[in-house]
Amino acid sequence: MNPGILGNIGLVLAVFFSVAGLVAVVFSWFLRDARYVRVARRSALLAFLGTFVAFGALEWALLTDDFSILYTARNHTSASPTWVKFATLWAALEGSILLWALLQTLYTWLAGRKMRDYWTSPVALGALFVIQLFFLVNVLFVINPFTPVPNPPADGPGPNPLLQNHWMMAVHPILMYLGFVGLSVPFAYAVAAMVTRRYQTWVSETKWWLIFAWGFLTAAIFAGGWWSYEVLGWGGYWAWDPVENASFIPWLLATAFVHTAMVQERRGLFRSWNFALVTLAFAGTVFGTFLTRSGVIESVHAFAGGPVGPIFLGFLLVILAVGFSLLGRVSSEVRDVGSVNVWSREGLLLFGALVFVVMAFVVILGTLFPLLVEAFNGAKVSVGAPFFNQLFVPLGYAMLVLMALGPLLPWRRAEGETLRVLAWMAVSLVLGTAAGLALGWTLWVSLTVGLFLFNLVALGWLIASPIARKSRALGGVRAGMGSLAWTRRRYGGYLVHFAVALSALAIAFSQSYRLDVQKTLQIGESWQVAGRTITVHALRAVEDPHRYSVIADVEISGMGMRQPRLNYYPTSRTPFASPSVAYTLGKDYYLVLQAFDQENAQWVTLRLVVTPLVLWLWVSAVLMALGTAMILWPARRAARAAAAGEVGA
């Protein structure tokens, strides 16, 4: 049996058991018989195993250089390193959708195991079966990677060279899909809640899935920024590229939902908001997939245009229609009773959610505007970073203010102690901004410094105040510190907020103070720049099985030898720059080999980009991941009871 046959068998089985599971939940719903839900759970496991067989078959073909199927013939080369062969599975359209289908079946199976509610389980599980069937049917009938090749070639072209330049491309797409696919679970719970009219419990039941998906989506965005920084050779990490925007939109909407879901869980408010936000967040993942796989946009990240563009557009419209038609049907039943106090935690959480929704709208508008203009009058226009930055700077400052105030204010109304802390926060904001201006920083950077201190004071009080109360109640600082252990989730949230404030600081400095220079140097010549001495020692060539590289051995004083290179791939006439980055706590020294003497190897043209605080952007990503893990980490039963008691107080 060859990989093509095995892969198709796996896909057929996955589709069959998905249909069987969907039929089972339909019977469970109409016959009110929970036994059919158990059948559906077993079908979900078998569908996952079938998809896993197909996934394994495609990896088998790639790792063994089997060019008898269409996917390997188009996207693989036997000269690739092993890690590139493994990652080639999601380097093109067909394989990436197969990866999505694999993760979707995994989520369906895992979510089905956790569903216990007699009324909502059939509907939620049915929604997940429909979603996974959409992807499986597309892989099997529309973009089948296992289509046999009548006359298999001896070798193939290999994946996009940009995907071979950094190991992060073996990680970033998986993180992204874990986030994208994970948002289908809260959406399925929301559909079930609206169908069964059980409007309150679904938020608590889906909270873990929501944070899990949000954490992976956050990690994926930062990982993509690092990949861009390390691979593209342009000295930056974010360019408001349409594909970058495609991942940012669902993240913004999911972040809004994370905060309004807290209010519903605590006070039963914002139910209609949550149904709308979870629909938009999941629809955002499909919208991003449509953008990157339809061929309607041009991007270094995008896949080539294929037949799935109109199909994904139709699926997007179906998701929006289902979510909002159900919301319209129950809108009168989920309307909030009474008013929300603006100067309270729930009031500020609502304002924060509005800020994130407006951000998402700005990104959608900036991304689609060139397409709409071209569609209506044929003119080509571009919307670049200035448009996004002009709107995002004030929105970002509003987010930083609300992020500090939201956790600080109690539910319903503010108290005297809170007002005293707010006074100290205001002082830190003024002093931080004034100090930045005195040091000659721009107004925007100085204000960011002030807002960072504003958040720092708030977080410091949020951490210190409970410890002080516990110390007084339990008779000692050690006992008070012990309370940290059973409030891990709360402090995980604080850590995430601190990381966001830190990333804002890093973004402000790295975008505002950036030295970008270049110079042609003879071999052995030195260059005095940015307080460093850069010396070119040699120019050499290295030939690997899958590429040819020209490497400059360059020494940066105090940082050792750096080796920027130009990589040449058989499938491309254009070389791909692979920069060398010297990371420091204060500044990054980003070195790019721009050109070289092709005849005598006597000179090179180097580009140096010196950017402050970029390292802290990656540190903030690690802190966000750690904070998310703390939130998700299961608490002991006694710890949960103690934490619930404190929250109730």
Image (tube, helix red, strand yellow):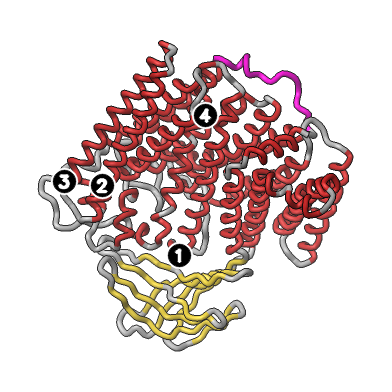
- Apparent side of residue 491 relative to residue 304 in the rendered image (left or right): right
**Dividing the image into 4 quarters, which one contains the N terminus?**
top left
Residue at 40 percent across and 56 percent down: it is: 169
Report the amino acid beneath label 1. Gly
Q: Nearer the viewer, mark 1 or mark 4?
A: 4
**Separation of marks 3 and 1 at Cα, in angstroms:** 41 Å
The circle on residue 58 is 2
Judge the density around disc 1: few (<14), some (14-19), many (≥20) Cα neighbours within 10 Å.
many
Q: Residue farthest to the left?
A: 151
Label 4 belongs to which residue? 279
Q: CA distance from mark 3 to mark 4?
A: 41 Å
Q: Any magenta on residue 230? A: no
Please identify, in this view, whether the residue under mark 3 or under mark 4 is nearer the observer: 3
Q: How many residues crowd around disc 2 within 10 Å: few (fewer than 14), some, or many (20 or more)? A: many
Q: Is residue 173 left or right of residue 502?
A: left
Q: Earlier in the sequence, mark 4 or mark 2?
A: 2
Q: Nearer the viewer, mark 3 or mark 1?
A: 3
> CA gap, disc 1 to disc 2?
32 Å
Q: Nearer the viewer, residue 590 or 66?
A: 66
Residue closest to the eye, 625 or 586: 625
Residue 485 — which label?
none
Q: Where does residue 131 sit, x and y in percent of width and height? A: 39, 29
What percent of the width, then of the height, locates residue 638? 67, 39
Q: Nearer the viewer, residue 24 or 435?
A: 24
Query: Which of marks 4 and 1 precedes in the sequence?
Result: 1
Q: Which mark is residue 233?
A: 1
Dot 4: element = helix
Tell me how far mark 1 sits from mark 4, CA to CA. 37 Å
**x%, y% of residue 583?**
55, 70
Q: Is residue 645 left or right of residue 11?
A: right
Q: On the rendered structure, is 266 left or right of 409?
A: left
Q: Is residue 605 visible?
A: yes
